[in-house]
Image (spheres, grey):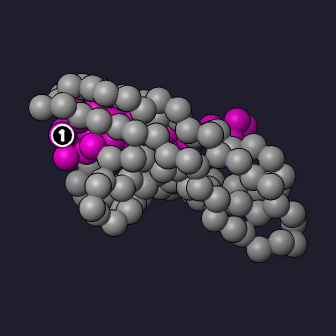
């Protein structure tokens, strides 16, 4: 099995910064893409940013220029640095990893438990 453990959420004032971390562990042969999603109350979960094993990134327009995704392949960890936070960034942030657990196995999606980010105005 694969586990994703997130950390770094919390309460911050508008304009502030936070850094989220997500570490994957368990039966991992290779991690393909890793990324961050968020879900605000009453809204659907949406992609915030993702990064491939080669370092190619995809960032939502709503956070482009403010949020930066990165990863440390040696540590199976993905990060999200969030700057100039806005109240509309308030949500539960989830980490996702697309993992292959054996050389010939298909890849599966694994999710973290979520971490709350609250931005006060």
Q: Residue furthest left?
A: 121
- Judging depth in this view, the residue of 43 and 95 nearest the camera is 43
Question: How far from the left and from the top, in percent, is residue 32?
Answer: 65, 59
Q: Is residue 78 visible?
A: yes
Q: Residue at x 20, y 25 (%)?
A: 13
Question: How far from the left and from the top, in percent, is residue 19?
Answer: 42, 30
**Count of marks, rendered view:** 1
Question: How far from the left and from the top, in percent, is residue 70?
Answer: 50, 41
Q: Quadrant of the N terminus?
A: bottom right
List the residue tagged with mark 1.
Answer: 87
Magenta stretch bounds: 64-90
Q: Is residue 12 left or right of residue 78?
A: left
- Judging depth in this view, the residue of 42 and 31 nearest the camera is 42
Q: Is residue 79 left or right of residue 47?
A: right
Is 70 within the magenta? yes
Question: How far from the left and from the top, in percent, is residue 7?
Answer: 53, 32
């Amino acid at each position: 099995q694969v586990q994703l453990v997130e950390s770094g959420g919390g309460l911050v004032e508008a304009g502030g910064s936070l850094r989220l971390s997500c570490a994957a562990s368990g039966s991992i042969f290779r991690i393909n893409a890793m990324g961050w999603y968020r879900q605000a109350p009453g809204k659907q979960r949406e992609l915030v940013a993702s990064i491939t094993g080669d370092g190619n990134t995809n960032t939502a327009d709503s956070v482009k220029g403010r949020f930066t995704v990165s990863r440390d392949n040696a540590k199976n960890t993905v990060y999200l640095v969030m700057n100039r936070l806005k109240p509309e960034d308030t949500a539960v942030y989830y980490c996702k990893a697309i993992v292959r657990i054996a050389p010939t196995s298909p890849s599966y999606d694994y999710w973290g438990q979520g971490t709350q980010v609250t931005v006060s105005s």
